[in-house]
Amino acid sequence: MSRNIIVLGAGMVGVSVAWHLARRGHDVTLVDRREPGLETSFGNAGIIQREAVRPYAFPRDIGTLLRVLPNREVDIRYRPTGMVSAAGPLLNYWLNSGGERYARIVEEWASLIMRCQDAHAPMIEAAGAEALVRKGGWLELYRTRKEFDERLQEAKENHERFGVEYEVLDAEALYAKEPHLAKGLIGAIHWTQPWMVSDPGGLVQAYARSFAEQGGHVMQASVEEVQQVGTGWRVKTSEGALEADQVVVAMGPWSGELLGKLGMNVPLFVKRGYHMHYSAEEGATLNHWVMDAEKGFLLEPMRAGIRLTTGAELADLDSPPQYKQLAAAEKVARKLFPLGKRRDAQPWKGARPCMPDMKPVIGPAPDKEGLWLAFGHGHQGFTLGPATGELLAQMMDGEEPAVEMAPFRVDRF
Ligand SMILES: Cc1cc2nc3c(=O)[nH]c(=O)nc-3n(C[C@H](O)[C@H](O)[C@H](O)COP(=O)(O)OP(=O)(O)OC[C@H]3O[C@@H](n4cnc5c(N)ncnc54)[C@H](O)[C@@H]3O)c2cc1C
């Protein structure tokens, strides 16, 4: 039976949910205060990460914690105020990042990641977006034997347990692929399955156009409040009120704020990140997406230039940008590859929407018939948007989802 559904938030997650619901014949309106794909889903590293079968854990070893503490590292930075306001979720994140708890989370998380490409593929095709997607994988670079060997051991396990494919490159094989990287690297892991997107926001926009071609409506308005009215829902926006049978909240890092107004307290916190585009110096080319694994940043040869994306900054969602982490990453990156001039007037800042157990929230809101949730995808929301859309649409239509969804319901908190 066709229903009238409003999806709030047009990032990778909301657009994918809307796309699947429209494909199933529902009358869907997708609402965002901006055009689709201009927030977190715009500025990321653009990798559809089939290799990321273990979610990003909080570092628990004393060596890493001591290294990060002075707040001068490239991979992780923090602001004391951000640490205090997210203290509860961060403590739980820390507790969930080791032992049996983490082992169980990996199994559950991997069940989503393993679907990522099968879920993106039909959307890429329907959107005619093949030109934005590059296949063939990316390179994780290593400088020291110990770190390389530890990661290779994990890669081997991920291959056996979750079908992750990779090739080991020694220094010679690596420099044959990337001749302009500076000497000193001892090798790399070539994750061969992932797909790389040369304009991540462009892919979300292409998916949104495909949604509209299926009869979906895209509305630009700021969402102010959501209220249950009889058996349906009313959404108050800057452009007036909308009514629907069902509402999906997919507002990424802003989802908690809206749900708070409904009396729902979700332990969402953010890890912010930055990017900047650069030219390459005359005669230098970067052929692959590369991660400097021991320093903690990525370089991505995208449409807009070589994009440098930073690691995590633990800070409040709305606190002013702080560009020291990007500057530190840029300094190391310039030694790794001959980057030329900065291309953007200002660095981009975004915020990964994170949950304390590293898993997204996908499913119904308890005691609120007709309200559905899809947010909190952390480091891999660009990868997981389409799988989330597919699974949530199955749940909303009363079908048995292709994956056990209990681990992703919000009532686990
Ligand atoms: C530096 C960096 C690198 C990353 N690299 C990768 C990667 O390589 N691969 C990967 O899979 N993931 C990556 N991620 C994570 C990924 O970008 C996010 O998980 C994902 O974009 C989240 O998507 P979303 O749709 O939930 O949120 P968003 O894209 O932020 O969408 C939320 C939408 O809600 C809208 N909204 C908010 N409030 C309102 C309101 N009141 N009214 C109306 N609209 C509203 C916003 O305008 C926005 O469009 C990276 C993140 C960062 C920061």
Image (cartoon, rainbow, N blue to C red):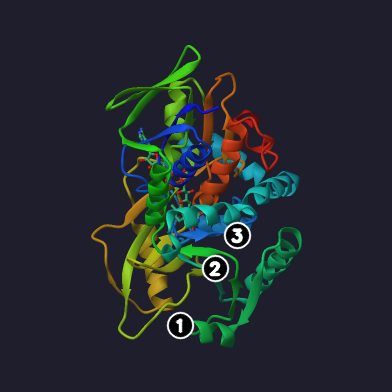
- The x, y position of residue 310, in whole percent, is 43, 59
Q: What residue type is labelled 2?
A: Glu
Q: Residue 50 carries which label?
A: 3
First in sequence: mark 3 vs mark 2: 3
Q: Which amino acid does label 1 sit on?
A: Ala
Q: Mark 2 points at which residue?
A: 294
Q: Residue 401 carries which label?
A: none
Q: Which amino acid does label 3 sit on?
A: Arg
Count neighbours of disc 3 (C-alpha within 10 A) and say few if under 14, some if 14 to 19, many if 20 or more: many
The answer to whether 230 appears left or right of 194 in the picture is left
Mark 2–mark 1 distance (CA, rounded to whole Å): 15 Å
- SS for callout 3: loop
The answer to whether 389 appears left or right of 15 in the picture is right
Q: Name the residue under label 1.
A: 182
- SS for callout 2: loop
- SS for callout 1: loop
Count neighbours of disc 1 (C-alpha within 10 A) and say few if under 14, some if 14 to 19, many if 20 or more: some
Residue drawn at x 49%, y 57% is: 125
Mark 3–mark 2 distance (CA, rounded to whole Å): 21 Å
- The x, y position of residue 260, in whole percent, is 46, 25
Residue 43 visible to the viewer: no
The answer to whether 375 appears left or right of 300 in the picture is right
The answer to whether 217 appears left or right of 188 in the picture is left
Residue contact between numbered discs 3 and 2, judged by CB atoms under 8 Å:
no
Q: Nearer the viewer, residue 366 or 122?
A: 122
Residue 229 quadrant = top left
